[in-house]
Image (cartoon, rainbow, N blue to C red):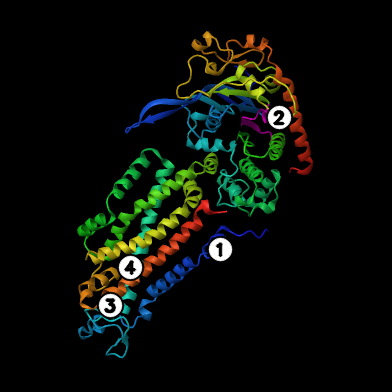
Amino acid sequence: MIQSADGALLRVEDLVKHFPVKKGLFGRSTGAVQAVDGISFELARGETLALVGESGCGKSTTGRLLLRLIEPTSGKVWFDGQELFALDAQALRAQRRSMQIIFQDPYGSLNPRMTVEQTLAEPLALYGLAAGRQKERGAELLGLVGLSAQHAQRYPHEFSGGQRQRIGIARALAVEPRLIVCDEPVSALDVSIQAQVINLLMDLQRRLELSYVFIAHDLAVVKHIATRVAVMYLGRIVEYAGKRELFARPRHPYTRALLSAIPVPRPGARRQRIILQGDVPSPIDPPSGCRFRTRCPYAQARCRVEDPPLIADDEHAVACHFWRDIAASPIDAPLAEAATIDLRLARLQEAFRERTPIG
Amino acid sequence: MANEETPFQRIVGDFVADPVAVFGLVLLTIIMLIAIFAPLISPQNPYDLAQLDVMDSRLPPGTSSPTGGTFWLGTDDQGRDMLSAIFYGLRISLSVGVIATVIALAIGLALGLVAAYFGGRTETIIMRIADIQLSFPAILIALILLAVLGQGMFKIIAALVTVQWAYYARTVRSAALVEKRKEYIEAARCLALAPPRIVFRHLLPNCLPPLIVVATVQVAAAIALEATLSFLGLGLPITEPSLGLLIANGYQYLLSGKYWISFFPGVALLLTIVSINLVADQMRDVLNPRLQR
C-alpha cells in the first residue's frame, strides 16, 4: 500500500461489505453479493481521490461506507484519527458534520416539498449553526455555489438539473464539512453543465480546503479533478496511483481498456481500442484467482489460481501478476489522445468560467 | 419573485377542469352542509319522541301534517318525518364515516411508515397482520366485532377502524418504500437528522398524495359498510337512526306500496357515496404524478 505522509484525513483499511442474499420462507442466507471486498486507501487533506469503475463495481457502496450510511461487514475507516465504525451514535452524529455527500441524481436528491431555504436551514438548525441569522447564512451558501439569494423561496421543481446540483452542494456545505463524497455528481448533467459544476467543486475545494472522494465512471472528468485515482473492479481496487502517473502509464489491463474507451473528439482519429469481452461477472460468485481474468486479454493459467495482491511500486500500486510484461506490449494508443480530451474540457470550462462568475 | 403557481394552486386548477367532478364536489358540499346544520333546517326533531305521533305513521310524501307543515317525503312507521330523519341520518352516517376514516388513517399511516422506514422484522410483522386482516371480508370482521362488542356509535367506529387501517398501512408503505430510496432521504440521514424528523418531515409529506385518494374512497366505503351493518341491525339503536337503519326500517313495506320509507334514505345514501367517489376519482387523477406535466 502507498503510505502518504502523516495527517491523512481519511484512511481506509481492508474495507469489506457483503450483502447477504436471502432466499426462501425463513430468509436463509444462501450467499453474498461481494460489493466491496477488501479495499484500502488514503486521502490527504485538500486532495481528491477518484474512485473509478463500471456500474456495479462497488464504488457507490464504498462512498456510503465512508459516511457510515451503511455498516461494513468488516474493515476500518479512520477519519481525522478517529475510527469511524467504533463511534457511538452521539459521536457519529458529531462526526457527520465533517463529512457530507453530493448525489448523482439532482432530481431525487432534494425534498420536493421543501423550499431551498428550508432545505438549507435544516442542517443549520440541527447543529445550531448561524443561530438567528439562518436566512443570511442560506443566502451566503447560495452565493457560494453561484445561485442568487432570491432563489431561496423556490421549490426544487423550479430549477434545472445543474441548479439543483448546486443546491445539493450548498446543502452539503451548510455544516462546513471537511470531506465530501461526490457520488457521480456530474454524470446526470449535460457536458456543458458538467464543466460548470466541476469548476465549482474545484473552486470550493481551494477556498474551503475540502477533501473529495470523487466517484465517477467518466475518466475525462476524473483527469480534470483528481489528485489520485483508484480503479475498482468487482469490489476490489486493481490500480491505485497519482493521476498523472495513472494516465501516463496505466499498468492494469483493465485500466488500459478504460483509458482506450475515452472517445476522441477528432474526426478520423486512429487508435487502438481494447474492447473487453463479455460482462462483469456476478459479484455473488466472482471468478477464482484474479477477478478480471475472465475478460482479460492477457490472462494465463496462473491468473486462474492465484489472486494477485495490490502491490505498490514507485507510488503506483497494481493488482496484476503480469503488468510488467503487459506494459512492454505495444498498446500505448490511448495515452496521447487523452491529452486532447483534457484540452477540450479545459476549453469548455474556460468558456463557462467567463460567463458564470462564482461566489 | 417569479409568479410561479404553488402545488396547491395547480391541484385546484386541475380539479375544476372536470365538470363532473365539480358537480360531485358541489353535491358533497351541500350534503355536508345539510348534515352539519340538520337541527336548524329539519322540520322536526326525529329524536324527540314528544314530537312524534303514531297516528302520522306511514303517510305518503306530500301529506300535510297536523301541526301545519308538510311531510315532503312522507313518514315512517313511527310517524317520523322522513326528510328530518334523513337529515339527521346523514349527520350520523357522515360523522361515523369521517371519524372512522381519520382514526384508521392515523393508525395505518403510522404503522405503514414505521414498516417502510425500519424494514426487517418490524415490517414483516406489521404487513403480515395487514395481509391476514385483508384476506377476510370486511363485513365478516365487522360483524364478528359488533357481535362481541355490542351496539353503539363508538363500537361501530372501532369496527370500521379495525377493518380499514390495513388499506392505509399498505398504501403508505408502498409509497414510502419508493420515496425512501430517493437520495434526499439519504442526504437527511447523512446530516444525522433524527429518525422521527426524517420520517415525518421528509418521508410523510411525499407519501401523502396516494393516501388522500385512498382516504376519500374509504370514507365512502366506511359509510356504505356502516349502512350495511345498521341494515343488518348491528349498528346504531333505532332511536337514533343512520341512513342504513332507515332503509332497514322500511324495507318490509317496499312491496306494499309504501316505498318512501326505504327509498328516500336509499337515494340520500346513494348521492352521498356517488358524490364522494366522484371527488375521489378526480383527486386520484389530479394527484397522480404520472399524469402531471
Label 4 belongs to which residue?
A: B93
Q: Residue at x 50, y 67 (%)?
A: B19
Mark 4 or 1: the one toward you: 1
Chain of the residue displaying label 1: B
Report the residue that reaches farthest toward the front.
A268
Q: Tell which circle, 4 or 1, labels the residue nearer the N-terminal end.
A: 1
Q: Specify few, some or many for label 1: CA neighbours under 10 Å numbering under 14, 14-19, or 20 or more.
A: few
Query: Disc 2 marks which residue?
Result: A224
What type is the residue that disc 3 sits on? Trp
Seen from the viewer's position, the closer of residues B130 and A168 is B130
Instruction: Give how far apart the Cα atoms at labels 4 and 1 are.
Output: 31 Å
Q: Quadrant of residue B273?
A: bottom left
> Disc 2 and disc 1: Cα gap in Å?
48 Å
Report if residue B238 is visible in the image: no
Which label number is shown at residue B13?
A: 1
Image coordinates of residue B276 in percent, x first then y, are: 41, 65
Disc 3 marks which residue? B260
Mark 2 is on which residue type?
His
How far apart, in angstroms, are the residues tagged by discs 4 and 2? 69 Å
In the figure, B40 relative to B230: above or below?
below
Contact? badges 4 and 3 (CB < 8 Å)? no
